[in-house]
Image: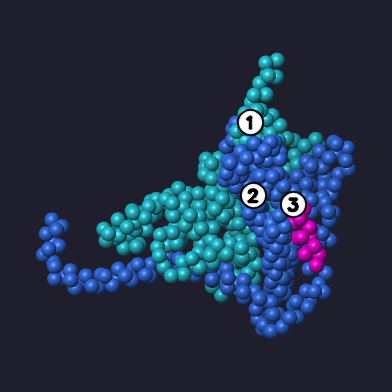
Amino acid sequence: MRNGTAIARVPAVRKTGRVRQRLRRLDVKASPYVYVAPFFLIFLAFGLFPLLYTAWVSLTDRNLLDPATQFVGLQNYTDLLHDSYFWNAVRNTLAIWVISTVPQLALALGLAHLLNTKLRARTLFRMSVVLPQVTSLVAVALIFSQLFGRDYGLINYVLGHLGFHHVYWEAGRFSSWIALSVMVMWRWTGYNALIYLAAMQAIPDDLYEAASIDGARPMRQFLHVTVPMLRPTIIFTVVISTIGGLQLFTEPYLFEPLHYGATGGSDRQYQTVAMYIYEKAFASSQFKFGYASAIAWCLFLLIAVISAVNFFIVRRIRSAE
Amino acid sequence: MAAVAVPRPSSRRKHLSRRFHRAGPLTYLFLILIAVGSLFPLYWSLVVASHDNSAVSAYPPVLTPGHELWHNIHRLFNSGEVNVSFWTALINSTIVAASVTAAVVFFSALAGFAFAKLRFRGSKALMLTIVATMLVPVQLGVIPLYIEMIHLGWVNRLPAVIAPNLVTAFGVFLMRQYIVGAVPNDLIDASRVDGCHTARVFWHVVLPAVRPAAAVLGLLTFMNTWNDFFWPLIVLSPRNPTVQVGVSTLASGYVEDYALVLTGTFISILPLLAVFIVLGKQIIGGIMQGAVKG
């Protein structure tokens, strides 16, 4: 049937054939670009453009309440250098980042090591370890804020029973940092452990064989085979935690009772840089978009610098060996 | 007594079969402790949500669930004492997460297909660019993004939280990796010989083959979108919130009603918990896959 119709239409096929061929070539050439275009269009419109435009807005005195925007040059940045609230926020952010990241990654490494054994109920353990990752930041922040409550929080109750004084977690600088770090660690340790676990399982068997022939016991194998082989993965997790940790917002924002000010406590004891951006731009009706953009751009630079330093340090370690 | 004799040969075997040594009792102890630590805060939210608010200040604290859960849920959804419409929040979050998930999976499969199987100039550079964007903290562009939304007239409307999330670099990357291995070149060539244009190849050959990866990507995307907070907080108001904004608004009332706040919190994590219990294995697989290849 099909053959028959095709033969009957030979002349037509020749003419449309050329058009078809051209269409076909166009299809082969253009399709890939059409297929990857959505990503780039949306990323440009809602990702890259706003980020770059932040740099421009930071050079103006743009304010949502005042339509007349003026170019002010580096004024916002010089103001920022003398803004003690800004430096306070930088200090808090860096401190919370270190306190939450270092123990978290160490714990994750140990946890991955434990999970990388012949285990009964393996899936169950893995699931319980990733469960916090499924929980939203908002839920984590609200649940833990209650647990860290001064008068009725469970943590203070347990401390009291162990013979310690109650801690007013939210009010102190260091104690609030600890509380926030616990929230971050609770949500992310299992996730990082799974990433390490995946990388551990990709380490070739012969390395362990060689090590055990050399008489290395499990602990030594862990330190001298597993950890060095995991280095790229460790870099990956450090970079990811840096980018995430320096933008910390939700936990401290919701840790504050009645949280509308985004000031991070009465003494700004745990206000992070991201919170300070939010405070200047959106909370407390200031709408200082120019100034807030300057803060955002500084945070961006800070993240870039710290990531570069991380990278540099890790490379130094590698070449030193 | 016989048990004493057992460890020796087995520990020797462990020595030789090096890596997957059997987990000892200490390992189990640690893992159980960590599992309990992971579960407890969630359990705790249920405990508080199922009691009267006065139970929060009970001494010693109540550690078992009570009978007030339905009452608290009723208060959350129906009464005038709540400063946010929780129904609206749930419906909004469902709409946002569903549309973002559908778009991310579709666009990622499309781009992943192009990068995995089609030849075009600049493909390597473009793929590298996409991977590099994962390292750009775009959240820092919120202020101009907000200005954009004002111009588009989307402030306080759902498109504002949908549009910026329609694609993710992680999605494209995951799909590319998967399609490279899962779709044989022969199959694509054969369908081309049959006269399929590229879009048909994508629709009839690639899309059916990527279902497993699409499921994982879809799950992770749905979770992330459902849990997103910073941007929705900025661009939406408590009158038209997502679940996360709604829950956080609950916590900003002038009376600290922990029972109500944690009821909202508990309900906000319930859909994800349900998904996780059913599909946890796939989610774990997704995280681990992304890790190895990332």
Q: Residue furthest front?
A: A214
Q: Which mark is residue A230?
A: 2
Dominant secondary-structure state across the stretch colored magenta: helix
Q: Secondary structure at mark 2?
A: loop
**Which chain identifier belongs to the blue chain?**
A
Side of B73 relative to B111 (left or right): right
**Quadrant occupied by the C terminus of chain B:** bottom right
On whether disc 1 and disc 3 are found on a single subunit, the reply is no
What is the x, y in percent for residue B96? 53, 58
- Nearest to the observer: residue B276 or residue A241: A241
N-terminal of the pair, mark 2 or mark 3, is 3
Would you name the residue on which mark 1 appears?
B14
Q: Is residue B58 left or right of residue B194?
A: right
Secondary structure of the residue carrying numbered label 3: helix
Q: Inspect the image, locate mark 3, and give the three-letter code of the amino acid beneath it.
A: Val
Residue span colored magenta: A87-99
Q: Which chain is cyan?
A: B
Q: Is residue A59 magenta?
A: no
